[in-house]
Image (cartoon, helix red, strand yellow):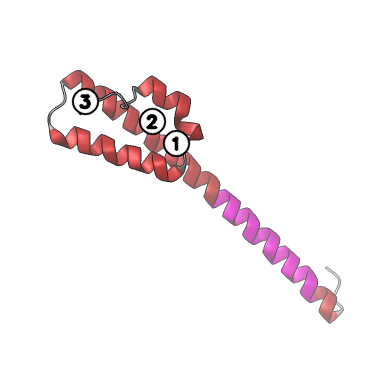
Amino acid sequence: MKGPNRMTPRQLTETEESQSFEHQLEMIEAIVADLESGSLSLDDMLNRYEAGMRLIAACQQRLNDAELKVTEIAEVTASTSMKAHDRGTGNDA
């Protein structure tokens, strides 16, 4: 399915960082639907596949970054909590 709002792999590279994670997932789902439709030429299928793989990599990187941020927040929270507990019990950290 090719239309005026379909993006080439190169265009996806330029805009993928500015798109929300959810929007990137929607784009991946649209690509999968296009590939499953069987109505694309081989060249179009390869282009859509490449675009999808690029989006998947971008989503994976965002998930990795989010996981790292959650881990950092948990560590800071645990450290702050321990310091507050130590102050309350008179123990020095």
Relative side of 92 to 60, left or right: right
**Disc 2 + disc 1, Cβ < 8 Å:** yes
Q: Residue at x 28, y 23 (%)?
A: 47
Badge 1 density bin: few <14, some 14–19, many ≥20, Cα 10 Å: some
User: Residue furthest toward the bottom?
Assistant: 89
Query: Is residue 79 placed above or below 13 in the rendered structure?
Result: below
Relative side of 41 to 10, left or right: left
Q: Residue at x 21, y 18 (%)?
A: 43
Give the residue pinned by disc 2.
Answer: 54
Q: Earlier in the sequence, mark 3 or mark 2?
A: 3
The quadrant in which the C terminus is found is bottom right
Give the residue pinned by disc 3.
Answer: 45
Q: Nearer the viewer, residue 71 or 92?
A: 71
Q: Residue at x 58, y 55 (%)?
A: 70
User: Residue furthest toward the left?
Assistant: 38
Asked if residue 77 is among those painted magenta in the image, a careful observer would answer: yes
Highlighted magenta segment, given as a residue range? 67-85
Q: Earlier in the sequence, mark 1 or mark 3?
A: 3
Residue 58, numbered circle: 1
CA–CA distance in space, label 2 to label 1: 6 Å
Query: Is residue 34 placed above or below 47 in the rendered structure?
Result: below
User: Disc count in the image?
Assistant: 3
- State which quadrant residue 33 falls in: top left
